[in-house]
């Protein structure tokens, strides 16, 4: 971890490691706030970017099983096949769907990124420059709530037919956040708080855009050296990118959470039934969550995106993971086939990002493989 901070000029990081549900290591490295001389603590909070998505996915499955118990769906599979547009009280901008195929998007499509939105073709409306275009079209500022943004995208054409292809989509997970709110009659943050509280997790929550609004125990975020300032989405003033290039509150369900490394590994440990707290989803739902999607591109691929997780089958089981990235943030949550779980969080995103994330993954895997005997204590 120290080598990675030095090589990629990152101020601070946090690392947590668990084995068979026992927390074996939780440590902070470097600076949470370099100017104030505040070190990273083992339980420091970090923005986790797209590592939010597997947490949202579990919340959706948890909600689905609740609705089954209430008799609103016959089983979880029926919930996953349900057409999302018919479940939501959303009106397309201008009053008309931009593509009739939108009506066929299912809950499963959103979870596995097969809903028809492709940011490589049509841009990502959650981020600039596409966000700027959407905001101007709506006559709104870029710091807009997520609902009008989604309603605008419902008035546009899809990039492909839902259920035929997987293309990573922040917008799809933003829609899942709206689905949770509408079907649970709670805010996304409140629903998540209830589910996570039952798991013994109390500090994973939605973050805020501005530096002055950071949460108690949250680190400060740094752009890479010599990175340019940008105009804030909030007021147009010049700010560092982590504090104004995007409106974090609108990203709640797709990339807006903050968390500590120990609570992220606990999330996986409880999910797998290794802790005394009850898992939020059943064994059947967890199996469905990790299944290979029935999409042609995954027929013979070594890695696939399931319901909220990137999954790589290995000889001794499944390795599943998710990473996250925003200006000022880089994160990774990694579950190995032997029930080792590793969370690594950083308060800067290097300019050579893909080199860094590859280096991080390889370093953590190599370190885990070198362990010959795991301790028996539990720091949870």
Image (cartoon, rainbow, N blue to C red):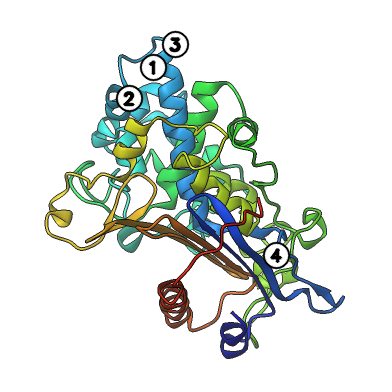
Residue under label 2: 76
Q: Which mark is residue 68?
A: 1
Mark 4 residue element = helix
Where in the figure is residue 175, as x and y percent of width and height? 45, 38
Real-space Cα separation, disc 1 to disc 2, in angstroms = 7 Å
Real-space Cα separation, disc 3 to disc 2, in angstroms = 12 Å
Please report contact status of discs 2 and 4: CB closer than 8 Å, yes or no: no
Q: Which mark is residue 12?
A: none
Q: Which mark is residue 70?
A: 3
Residue closest to the eye, 380 or 205 = 380
Sequence-first tag of 2 and 4? 2
Identity of the residue drawn at 44% across and 42% down = 272
Sequence-first tag of 4 and 3? 3
* Residue 256 appearing in the image: no
On screen, residue 298 above or below 330: above
Residue under label 4: 243
Real-space Cα separation, disc 1 to disc 4, in angstroms = 41 Å
- Mark 3 surroundings: few (<14), some (14-19) or many (≥20) residues within 10 A: few
Where in the figure is residue 182, as x and y percent of width and height? 52, 24
Please report contact status of discs 3 and 2: CB closer than 8 Å, yes or no: no
Mark 2 residue element = helix
Residue closest to the eye, 207 or 275 = 275
Answer with the quarter of the image where residue 348 lies.
Answer: bottom right
Sequence-first tag of 3 and 2? 3
Identity of the residue drawn at 20% across and 44% down = 161
């Amino acid at each position: 971890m120290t080598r990675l901070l030095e090589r990629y000029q990152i101020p601070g990081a946090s690392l947590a490691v668990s084995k068979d549900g026992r927390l074996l290591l939780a440590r902070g490295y470097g600076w949470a706030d370099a100017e104030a001389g505040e070190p990273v603590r083992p339980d420091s909070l970090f923005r986790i970017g797209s590592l939010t998505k597997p947490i949202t996915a579990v919340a959706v499955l948890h909600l689905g099983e609740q609705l089954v118990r209430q008799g609103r769906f016959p089983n979880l599979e029926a919930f996953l096949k349900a057409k999302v547009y018919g479940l939501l009280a959303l009106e397309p901008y201008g009053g008309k769907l931009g593509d009739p195929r939108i009506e066929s998007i299912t809950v499963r499509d959103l979870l596995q990124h097969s809903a028809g939105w492709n940011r490589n073709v049509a841009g990502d409306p959650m981020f600039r420059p596409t966000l700027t275009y959407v905001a101007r079209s709506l006559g709104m500022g870029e710091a807009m709530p997520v609902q009008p943004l989604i309603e605008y995208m419902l008035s546009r054409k899809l990039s492909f037919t839902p259920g035929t292809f997987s293309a990573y989509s922040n917008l799809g997970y933003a829609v899942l956040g709206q689905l949770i709110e509408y079907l649970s009659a709670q805010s996304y943050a409140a629903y998540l708080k209830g589910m996570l509280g039952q798991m013994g997790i109390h500090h994973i929550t939605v973050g805020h855009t501005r530096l002055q609004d950071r949460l108690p125990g949250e680190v400060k975020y740094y752009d890479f050296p010599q990175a340019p300032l940008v105009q804030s989405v909030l007021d147009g003033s010049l700010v560092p990118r982590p504090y104004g290039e995007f409106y974090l509150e609108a990203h709640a369900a797709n990339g807006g959470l903050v968390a500590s490394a120990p609570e992220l590994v606990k999330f996986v440990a409880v999910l797998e039934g290794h802790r005394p707290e009850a898992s939020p989803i059943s064994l059947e739902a967890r199996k469905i969550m990790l299944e290979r999607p029935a999409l042609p591109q995954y027929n013979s691929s070594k890695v696939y995106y399931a319901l909220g997780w990137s999954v790589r089958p290995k000889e001794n089981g499944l390795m599943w993971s998710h990473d996250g990235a925003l200006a000022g943030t880089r994160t990774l949550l990694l579950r190995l086939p032997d029930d080792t779980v590793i969370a690594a969080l950083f308060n800067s995103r290097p300019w050579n990002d893909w080199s860094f994330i590859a280096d991080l993954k390889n370093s953590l895997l190599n370190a885990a493989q070198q362990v010959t005997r795991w301790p028996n204590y539990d720091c949870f």
